[in-house]
Every structure is written in structure tokens, then in C-alpha cells.
Image (tube, rainbow, N blue to C red):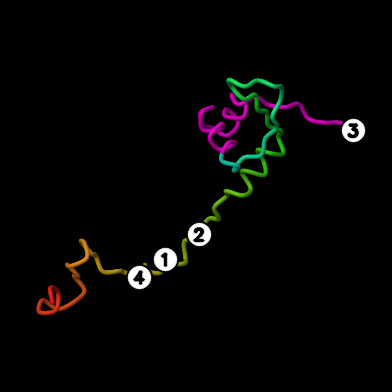
Amino acid sequence: MTTSPLLTCVQAAERLGVSDDTVRILANAGKLAHVRVGIGTRKARIRFTEADLEAYIARNRVAATTPDAEPEPAEQKPIRFGRRRKLDLPEAQRYA
């Protein structure tokens, strides 16, 4: 069984183009697969494989839109400022 070497947080951060703190946050949130190594209690020793990083990139890839397609306008919702003021109603019914 051949395995690829495990990467540290700093090495994974360099590959992803983010800080090592961001990598730790992603790993602790369960968004980036990782391996816990050792028995340290103060600072968790976590390592990553190339496959972990590639899977994360694949999950978070955003498809490009074609220049021919026009984006559909977003549905506009009425702006509400508190419970009493309803801007989508006529003036007479706003405070009734």
C-alpha cells in the first residue's frame, strides 16, 4: 500500500492559497477532511492528504457562466424596518 505524504497545515494552506488559521478552521468545522496525528492536547496536530485538498476544491468549485446567458433578475422583497413599518403597503395601511 503506497500512501502520499501527509501535509501540515502550513503546507495545505500554501496549496489552497489561504492562511494556516483558515485551514484549521475549515478542518475543525468538518469542511476539510483531515487526519489527527499524535496525542497532543494543547494544539491539535492535524495533517492532510493531497486527495483531501483535491476533494475540498472539487466540492467548492463554482461553474463559470456563459457570456451569452443573461442573469435573471432577483426577486425583490419589501424592506421592513421593525414590525410596524411595512413599506410594501399603501400609506394609509402602513400603521393601521
In this rendering, position of residue 11 left or right of residue 18:
right
Above or below, 22 relative to 67: above
Report helix, strand or loop for mark 2: loop
- Name the N-terminal-most of marks 2 and 1: 2
Q: CA distance from mark 4 to mark 2?
A: 20 Å
Residue behind mark 3:
1
- Name the N-terminal-most of marks 2 and 3: 3
Nearer mark to the viewer, of 3 and 1:
3
- Name the N-terminal-most of marks 3 and 1: 3
What's the residue at 56%, 32% (across, down)?
A: 23
What's the residue at 67%, 41% (across, down)?
A: 54
Query: x, y percentage for residue 85?
Result: 17, 67
Residue 14 included in the magenta stretch of the image: yes
Residue behind mark 2:
65
Query: x, y percentage for residue 16?
Result: 57, 34
Q: CA distance from mark 1 to mark 4?
A: 12 Å
Above or below, 20 relative to 52: above
Report helix, strand or loop for mark 1: loop
Nearer mark to the viewer, of 2 and 3:
3
The span picked out in magenta is: 1-28
- Name the N-terminal-most of marks 4 and 2: 2
Residue in the foreground of this view, choosing between 81 and 6: 81
What's the residue at 18%, 77% (across, down)?
A: 89
Q: CA distance from mark 2 to mark 1?
A: 9 Å
Q: Amino acid at mark 4?
A: Glu
Q: Amino acid at mark 2?
A: Thr
What's the residue at 58%, 36% (across, down)?
A: 28
Report helix, strand or loop for mark 3: loop
Q: CA distance from mark 4 to mark 3?
A: 54 Å
